[in-house]
Image (cartoon, helix red, strand yellow):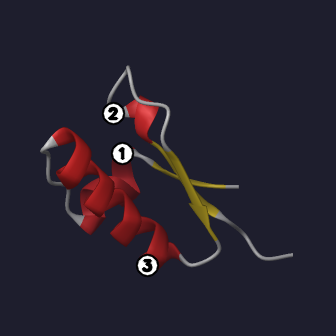
């Protein structure tokens, strides 16, 4: 079974329950960046997301 890459927005924004989970790390990062920019007006680099928010499940 392949590992999944999970980003939980609540870790960055306490009032947001948005969760991304994908077997494709690039897809998870792209969706997280789009969500953060469109919903919260914030921008994160791939590296910031990997180091601070990405979980392997």
- Percent position (x, y) of residue 28? 47, 67
Q: Quadrant of residue 41?
A: top left
Q: Is residue 30 above or below residue 55?
A: below
Q: 43 left or right of 28? A: left
Q: Quadrant of residue 57?
A: bottom right
In primary-sequence order, the first of circles 2 and 1 is 2
- The residue depicted at 28 percent of the width and 60 percent of the height is 33
- The residue depicted at 36 percent of the width and 45 percent of the height is 52
Q: Is residue 32 above or below residue 16?
A: below
In primary-sequence order, the first of circles 3 and 2 is 2
Dot 2 corresponds to which residue?
12
Label 3, label 2: how many angstroms apart (C-alpha)?
A: 19 Å
Q: Secondary structure at mark 1?
A: helix
Dot 1 corresponds to which residue?
52
Dot 3 corresponds to which residue?
26
Nearer the observer, disc 3 or disc 1? Answer: 3
Q: Quadrant of the N terminus?
A: bottom right
**Mark 3: few/some/many CA within 10 Å (<14, 14-19, 20+):** few
Q: Secondary structure at mark 2?
A: loop
Nearer the observer, disc 2 or disc 1? Answer: 2
> Do the residues bearing badges 2 and 1 touch, measured as CB atoms within 8 Å?
yes
- The residue depicted at 27 percent of the width and 63 percent of the height is 47
Q: Is residue 7 above or below residue 15?
A: below
- Percent position (x, y) of residue 7? 49, 50
Label 2, label 1: how many angstroms apart (C-alpha)?
A: 9 Å
In primary-sequence order, the first of circles 3 and 1 is 3
Q: 17 left or right of 2? A: left
- Percent position (x, y) of residue 49? 33, 55
**Mark 2: few/some/many CA within 10 Å (<14, 14-19, 20+):** some
């Amino acid at each position: 079974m392949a590992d999944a890459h999970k980003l939980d927005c609540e870790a960055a924004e306490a009032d947001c329950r948005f969760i991304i989970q994908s077997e494709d790390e690039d897809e998870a990062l792209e969706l997280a960046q789009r969500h953060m920019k469109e919903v919260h007006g914030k921008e994160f680099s791939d590296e910031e997301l990997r180091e601070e928010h990405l979980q392997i499940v």
